[in-house]
Image (cartoon, rainbow, N blue to C red):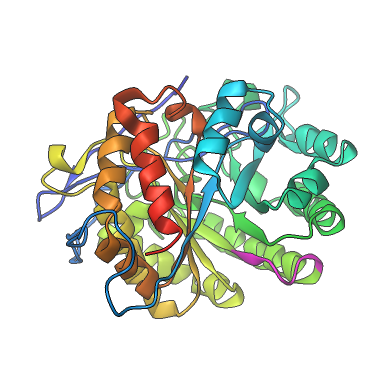
Amino acid sequence: MLNRREILLTLGIGAFLSACGGGSNAGGSQIGNSQGNTGSPIGGSQGGGSGSGSGGGSSGVSPVSMKFGLGDDPERMVNGYDPAGQAVLRRLNPQIVCFWLNGGRDASGRIVGSSMSFIRNWANARRFEEWSRAGYEIMLITWENYDGQNPALGHPTNGDYHISETFIRDLRETLQILREQVNTKTYVVLATEQSTYTACRRDSSCPHRIPHTDVISNETREYFSALRANLLRAIDETKSILPNSDFGTCFGGWLVEFTEGVDFIRFFEPVINASNAIFFQSMMDFKASERGGYGNPQRILRNCEFYSSYRKPIHLAHYMPNNHRADVVAEDAREMARVEYLRRLYSLGLRSFSFMYYGVVKDNRFGSLDELSRLRNLMRSF
């Protein structure tokens, strides 16, 4: 199912970096190809939080909660088009359902919004209204098939979708649908893993490494300047149409782990400053126990520590091992289902945690659904 080139990088602390992101199936499912880079490692917390197990809040401290989201296709889950998806939905009982707007390139070479037909069909069937009436909040995530990793989306976009007028039109149309049909909270997550979009612009082999991706360099500056400008336009559209949503761009979780990645984030500070929220992802393929104690739980904490300085709500837009390893989910969830860990994330500003694709846990391999359910239940009050 995946066309994935994983790059593992060893930091000075002995940690390995890896990451991932978007693709598409029936409702706009995303499986991406975002790698960490051979940048200069920087310091940061390695701890996953000491824990007191999966109980309630600590004595004498008022409990708090964190919203849980689930993707990647609300129609399959909520409407039961996939009975397994509906079963996972019922078990995890998320507050947020996530869908994706994917950019692609058609057979004639035109840049297109490959998911727009699904979005329009859902709108015509009043699906968004239905999901909202059922109490679900709605998260929209945008991505593009920059390197052609998803054949269903056609040829590589080379990053052209998110700098195009087509993207702005597709976003405007989708936002207007949400405004008309949704009465619950909305989240608008723009250009997830945007630092990878330059991989193929000058080299058809699509090297996922500096200086081709994850860095502002002589090779990439022109593109990322255009992307920054178009994202500012996208934020203006969002403010105009869905002013009460949480909106912003979504960074690859690996960027906070090396100097060039942090410089990349700083380059997009005009976008961060114009947004009212910050989004990131975490999709490492391995258990922390396999990589020197540094896995998704540690990456998630490290991102929250970094983005807390912006004093905006932080959202984990999509978490999942990119290689779909259910045993990684089980260990990650078991490690994160600790009161002190969740309280630390909350204190840093994390307000929602979304699991990318229900299919990874639908068979409960390695007890993955059980462990994820325990984590989700703890998030209700800790």
Q: Residue at x 76, y 25 (%)?
A: 108
> In this rendering, does residue 244 appear at all?
yes
Quadrant hosting residue 78: top right
Q: Residue at x 28, y 54 (%)?
A: 54
The reply to whether residue 165 is in sight is no
- For residue 137, side relative to residue 19 (left or right): right
Query: Which of the two residues, 359 or 318, is positioned nearer the viewer here?
Result: 359
- Residue 279 in percent (x, y) is at 49, 60
Residue 376, percent from left and from top: 43, 49
> In the rendered image, which quarter contains the C terminus?
bottom left
Q: Which of these two is toward me, 10 or 218?
A: 10
Q: Is residue 311 left or right of residue 79?
A: left
Q: Is residue 123 above or below residue 81?
A: below
Using the image, determine if residue 264 lies above or below residue 214.
below
Compared across the picture, whether 299 is left or right of 154 comes to: left
Q: Residue at x 59, y 72 (%)?
A: 275
Q: Which residues are magenta?
A: 241-247
**Of residues 51 and 35, the one drawn nearer to the viewer in this rendering:** 51
